[in-house]
Image (cartoon, rainbow, N blue to C red):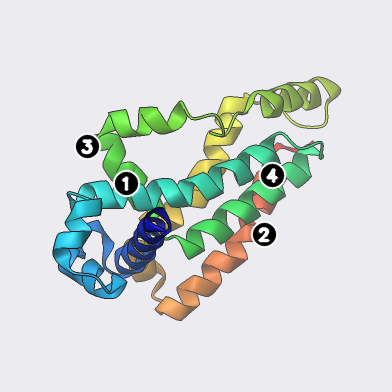
Amino acid sequence: MQKQLDSTTENNILAAAKHIFQHKGMIGARMQEIADEAGINKALLHYYYRSKQLLFEAVFKSAFSMLSPQLNEVLNADTSLFDKIRNFTNNYISFVIKHPYLPNFIIQELNRNPEFIKNLVSEKKFPNIEKFRTQINDKVAEGVIRPIKAEQLFINIIALNIFPFIAEPLLKGFVNISDDAYQQLLQERKIEVADFIINAIKI
């Protein structure tokens, strides 16, 4: 019974933290706010997570553990290359729209705590591009797509998907649109990014 209560409390904390981090980010969030959202006192919150950073990492791991297998499944599916690009883009953008703190957190942790990212990479379900690489090489050899390294193509896909989330305030200023209009723009990118990449590589 105690283990069940502990698990329920921890799940409530993670759900509360996710909500606060989504709205206020890592810097703006306060442990007291998260405790209030979870319906517990701050001392109990610190019992489970000694610092905001550890709690943020737990929230990140929880979300990334859902995203990583999805992307890995897309990359290793027995689908056409173009369908794979479309599915990857759709899955990634859809997921990050629901977890908008992830891209900035990754960038932050890459600079501040590279060991945390290294630990993520070492996990079993971290996306693997070996099958994707073989598929790219085969399609280049068949003359279906122009010569391009799989690594370069993968970086292009990731960059086009992630940048609108990382630079959202700046881009909204450049294009001069409201928050709602920008969210619609992100939804449209599920198709726009895939079409742009496919048109760029196909012969």
The answer to whether residue 56 is left or right of residue 195 is: left
The answer to whether residue 43 is left or right of residue 120 is: left
Q: CA distance from mark 3 to mark 4?
A: 31 Å
Q: Of callouts 1 and 2, which one flags the residue occurring earlier in the amino acid sequence?
A: 1
Q: Measuring 85% from the left and 23% from the top, which residue is drawn there?
A: 142
Badge 3 is on which residue? 112
| Amino acid type, label 2 | Ile
Q: Residues within 10 Å of mark 3 (few under 14, many from 20)?
A: few
The relative height of residue 170 versus residue 72 in the rendered view (above or below) is below
| Amino acid type, label 1 | Glu
Q: Measuring 50% from the left and 45% from the top, which residue is drawn there?
A: 65
Determine whether label 3 and label 2 are within 8 Å by CB: no
Closer to the eye: label 3 or 2: 3
Badge 1 is on which residue? 57
Closer to the eye: label 4 or 1: 1
Q: Measuring 62% from the left and 28% from the top, which residue is drawn there?
A: 129
Q: Is residue 97 visible?
A: yes
Q: Residues within 10 Å of mark 2 (few under 14, many from 20)?
A: some
Q: CA distance from mark 3 to mark 2?
A: 34 Å
The answer to whether residue 194 is left or right of residue 59 is: right
Q: Of callouts 4 and 2, which one flags the residue occurring earlier in the amino acid sequence?
A: 4
Q: Secondary structure at mark 2?
A: helix
Closer to the eye: label 1 or 2: 1
Badge 4 is on which residue? 85
The answer to whether residue 49 is left or right of residue 201 is: left
| Amino acid type, label 4 | Ile
Determine whether label 4 and label 2 are within 8 Å by CB: no
The circle on residue 191 is 2
Q: Residues within 10 Å of mark 1 (few under 14, many from 20)?
A: some
Q: Of callouts 3 and 2, which one flags the residue occurring earlier in the amino acid sequence?
A: 3
The relative height of residue 150 versus residue 85 in the rendered view (above or below) is above
